[in-house]
Image (cartoon, rainbow, N blue to C red):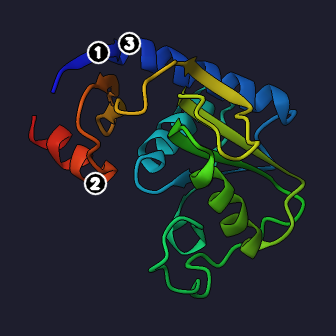
Amino acid sequence: MGQTRIMSPERVRRILRRFAYEIIERNRGAESVELFGIRESGGPLARAIAKEMEAVAQISVPVYDLDVTPFRDDRPDRSPPDAPPHQLDVTDRDVILIDDVVCTGRTARAALDAVVQYGRPRSIQLVVLVDRDHRVYPIQPDCTGQRLQTKTDERVVVQGEESFSVYVRRGGATSTAAQSKAAAES
């Protein structure tokens, strides 16, 4: 199985800084913004973007992890959603959903269902580091680091917790959990 780096840590850092500026500009500041990192990979990216936003706007931006598993339509074994894990209200707030990669749009669709359990936001925006463009649902990110044409047997892997690199792995359709474990071991 081959692996090719497509984004260095420096390039990802610049993209995250650009995301911070775009989010602030799009929402006329950061006062009404709530960041939701889609578990597992979106959480570290959301926290990194929040740090960049704090540096730019001198305001602390709340970050929450969003578990979309109970809302996925491609998992027949999913259980009904429990009560929301966070005691918050996003009514009239600008919700930013953050994930590492968007491919089919299934995770983003599930995230939409998951976030409305917290109220009716003013807006919901999707920010992704990599857009693979293999949509099943008509969902488009509002901010994208890079659009990348990939084959269905290739996987895009984002490695890191504070300093991120992005790789394309060829061959073998491994699960995201297996990829994350392999990334942590390498």
Q: Nearer the viewer, residue 151 or 130?
A: 151
Would you place residue 45 above or below residue 85 in this image?
Answer: above
Image-quadrant location for residue 117: bottom right
Can you say whether 60 is above or below 162 in the image?
Answer: below
Residue 22 coordinates in the image, percent (x, y): 73, 24
To which residue does mark 3 refer?
A: 10
Residue contact at pointers 2 and 1, CB within 8 angstroms: no
Q: Secondary structure at mark 1?
A: strand
Mark 3 or 2: in front is 2
Q: Estimate the spatial distance between the alpha carbons at disc 1 and disc 3, rounded to whole Å.
A: 12 Å
Position in image of residue 154 (x %, y %): 35, 29
Q: Which residue is mark 2?
A: 177
Q: State the separation of the CA atoms marked 3 and 2.
A: 25 Å
Of residues 119 and 5, the one drawn nearer to the viewer in this rendering: 5
Q: Quadrant of the N terminus?
A: top left
Locate residue 87: give its quadrant.
bottom right
Q: Secondary structure at mark 2?
A: helix
Q: Report which residue position mark 1 lands on.
A: 5
Q: Residue at 76% x, 31% y: name it.
A: 24
**Residue kind at label 3, given as amino acid type:** Glu
Gap in angstroms between the C-alphas marked 2 and 1: 19 Å
Number of numbered discs visible in the structure rendering: 3
Which picture quadrant has residue 71? bottom right
93, above or below 180, in the image: below
The three-letter amino acid code for the residue at tag 2 is Ala
What kind of residue is marked 1?
A: Arg
Which quadrant is the C terminus positioned in? top left
Residue 42 percent location from the top left of the image: 48, 46
Residue drawn at 57 percent across, 21 percent down: 145
